[in-house]
Image (cartoon, rainbow, N blue to C red):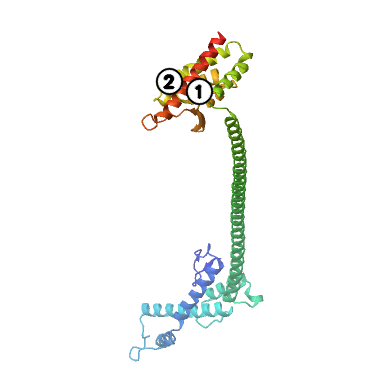
């Protein structure tokens, strides 16, 4: 990849590190410049021919050459250079050295050496052809390497795309699985909720039925209780029998009943004495847990009502102003009950 100066006097390494493609481009450029220098629309050839004639002409008066010594040297040097350029151009294009009479032997020898070193004699190739061939080979090689590189890049790109698609597909499957799990969870919770609703509804109906049966039973029992003085006595007898199993229970029950009715008689206008909650601990302990205790209230004229889902016993005071007779009968019933309780207490004593 070394180039030799046209005059053969020196070597240059300006193309040493350049590719054959770059050398081909450089050679094409140099060849164009030589062509331009040797023949620009024939003008240079005409000028050179004129210089050659002038070199041979002599002054008609003095008989001396038309050019002086220094001018003659410059003109001959110019003609020699242009001649060598023409020979170099032909050598580059055809691989042949076509010498002229004015050719420098050293320059011609240089061209022969170049031809020998490039192995152009046997191959029949020109410098341009050789460089063009090498340049084409280099271009083919570069193109192959570029295609191989592009192929590797394309394969890597496809691999990355496949990895990205696989990741997207994986995320999609995970999202679908998560959505399915969430859907299954919601469906399971909905089934459990419906099952609880059905269970709660069944339990509610069972409780309502049990409560209905209980109320019906209580109603039958209440309806069967004899009201008035005779009824009070019957329930006092039942209370006595019911308390026989526990010492002192009958006395406590009678005393509590006596206090209850005595308070109503003392203050009949106050509802707090006439209303008894069945869940009151003291009432349940002294009276409610014995057969005959609650029943005695019913026999004495109490009614069963429900307040906040709690069974209560209440005796309603008639209007003293509007119905004196009814009020008197109600109040006498309370006094008769107290008298019956006191009588039973005396018997107990």
Q: Which mark is residue 265?
A: 2
Q: Is residue 317 visible?
A: no
Position of the C terminus, as image quadrant, is top right
Measuring from the top left, give residue 300's x and y in whole percent: 51, 24
Element under label 1? loop
Q: The N terminus is located in which quarter?
A: bottom right
Q: For this view, does 173 lie left or right of residue 311?
A: right
Residue 280 shows which numbered tag?
A: 1
Check the image and report above or below for 159 versus 264: below
- Label 2 element class: helix
- Near-viewer residue (201 or 126): 201
Sequence-earlier tag: 2 or 1: 2
Q: Is residue 339 left or right of residue 121?
A: left
Could you tell me which residue is drawn at 60 percent across and 10 percent down? 247
Q: Which mark is residue 65?
A: none
> At 57% across and 27% down in the image, what residue appears?
226
Residue at 53% across, 23% down? 229
């Amino acid at each position: 990849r070394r180039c030799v100066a046209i005059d053969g006097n020196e070597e240059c390494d300006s193309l040493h590190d350049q590719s054959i493609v770059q050398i081909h481009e450089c050679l094409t450029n140099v060849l164009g410049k030589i062509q331009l220098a040797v023949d620009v629309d024939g003008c240079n050839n005409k000028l050179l021919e004129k210089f050659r004639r002038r070199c041979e002409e002599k002054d008609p008066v003095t008989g001396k050459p038309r050019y002086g010594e220094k001018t003659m040297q410059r003109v001959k040097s110019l003609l020699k250079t242009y001649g060598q350029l023409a020979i170099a151009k032909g050598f580059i294009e055809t691989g042949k050295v076509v010498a002229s009479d004015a050719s420098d032997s050293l320059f011609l020898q240089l061209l022969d050496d170049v031809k020998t070193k490039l192995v152009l004699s046997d191959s029949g190739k020109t410098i341009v052809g050789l460089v063009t061939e090498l340049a084409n080979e280099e271009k083919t090689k570069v193109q192959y390497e570029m295609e191989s590189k592009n192929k590797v890049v394309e394969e890597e790109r496809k691999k990355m795309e496949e990895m990205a698609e696989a990741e997207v597909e994986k995320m999609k499957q995970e999202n679908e699985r998560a959505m399915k799990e969430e859907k299954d969870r919601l469906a399971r919770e909905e089934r459990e909720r419906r099952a609880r609703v059905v269970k709660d509804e069944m339990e509610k109906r069972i409780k309502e039925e049990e409560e209905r049966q209980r109320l019906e039973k209580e109603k039958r029992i209440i309806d069967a209780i004899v009201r008035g003085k005779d009824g009070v006595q019957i329930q006092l007898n039942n209370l006595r029998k019911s308390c026989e199993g526990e010492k002192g229970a009958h006395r406590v029950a009678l005393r509590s009943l006596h206090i209850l009715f005595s308070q109503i008689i003392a203050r009949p206008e106050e509802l707090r004495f006439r209303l008894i909650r069945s869940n009151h601990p003291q009432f349940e302990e002294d009276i409610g847990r014995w057969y005959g205790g609650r029943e005695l209230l019913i026999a004495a004229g109490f009614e069963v009502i429900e307040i906040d889902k709690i069974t209560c016993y209440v005796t309603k005071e008639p209007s003293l102003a509007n119905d004196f007779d009814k009020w008197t009968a109600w109040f006498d019933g309370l006094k008769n009950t107290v008298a019956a309780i006191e009588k039973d207490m005396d018997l107990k004593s």
